[in-house]
Image: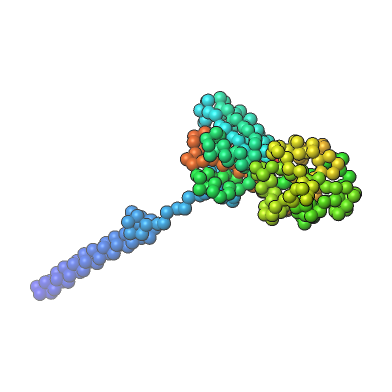
Amino acid sequence: MSQKNETGTLIAALVITLVILAGGFWWFTRQSGMNLGTLTGGENNSTQNPSPPTQPVNPGTPAANPNTAFAPPQTVPSGTIVRIAGSTSMVQINQALKQSFEQQFQGTTVETQAGGSDQGIRTLLTGGTDIAAISRPLISPEPSQGLVAVPVTKDAIAIVVGEQNPFQRGLTQAQVQQIFQGQITNWSQVGGTSERIRVINRPPVSGTRQAFQELVLNGGEFGQPPNTNIVTMQRDATTPILRELGSNGISYATYSQVADQQTVRIVPVDGLTPQAANYPYQRELYYVYKQPATPQVQAFLGYVGSPQGQGAIAATNQ
């Protein structure tokens, strides 16, 4: 009888032990699960170990893609009007996007004006336009005025002479700089005939002129009359400049505006033409809006970054 009691006691002890072990295992796995949830972003993550906020993408930085500005629109209400003003270098791009946008979104209108980058910025700040087209980066104090620049495409600045100019050679970067700063004033100094060089310059409001100063003159100044042979045009327009070149003039323009011109010739720089990937005079073109962006601005800039918009832009470089 005592043996049966001992056996019962042993069985009871074994059952109690198993219950204790099972309870301990349950408690351990529950605590481990909670800790694992904390480490892998579970519910406790928001209160015990919050993640740092994600930094917003700045569409105004030169490296940004237009797609990061606004999403491509699916629909745009009929009657929407988008006004664009600014750089003469972006006339062809503006027109290409205008036609493509209006065709895709029936009943919309894109109005474009070209009077220079600075004029575009001024008009944007005063509410006279929705978007400024500029051929230079934003400069102080423009960003602090609520302006944001969205990169549109890259562009090259071409050095051009008239078709009748007997100069058939290329120039080095140093020679281009010296010509536009008034240090070289005769074509014979760069291997041409003995004839005075006439430099046809753009007005100070021109974004292309400002970009030229940075890219070509390294931030320096153009030669100043009357001690140099520089003629500054009153209006920032490419066609009058090309007409002014004659047989001894030299100037500069966005490549897309002169690539198919029959009256001018593009001068290679360091043996490179503007089509070359390593051509030295390249820049970014931008669309600028004022925060907060209106619905029509969001729609148009979203379209610029879409495959259709990028295709329209690419067609202007062909």
Query: With 130 as the anchor, is 187 left or right in this view?
Result: right
Query: With 165 as the anchor, is 182 left or right in this view?
Result: left
Q: Is residue 303 above or below residue 221?
A: above
Residue 51 occupies quadrant: bottom left
Q: Position of residue 86 (x, y in %)?
A: 62, 38
Q: Position of residue 210 (x, y in %)?
A: 66, 47
Q: Is residue 276 above or below residue 291?
A: below
Q: Quadrant of the N terminus?
A: bottom left
| Residue that sits furthest to the left in the current view | 1
Residue at 88% across, 52% down: 188
Residue at 54% across, 46% down: 142
Q: How is the image coloured?
A: rainbow
Query: With 171 as the anchor, is 157 left or right in this view?
Result: left
The mark total stands at 0
Residue at 89% across, 45% down: 166
Q: 225 or 135, which is in the foreground?
A: 225
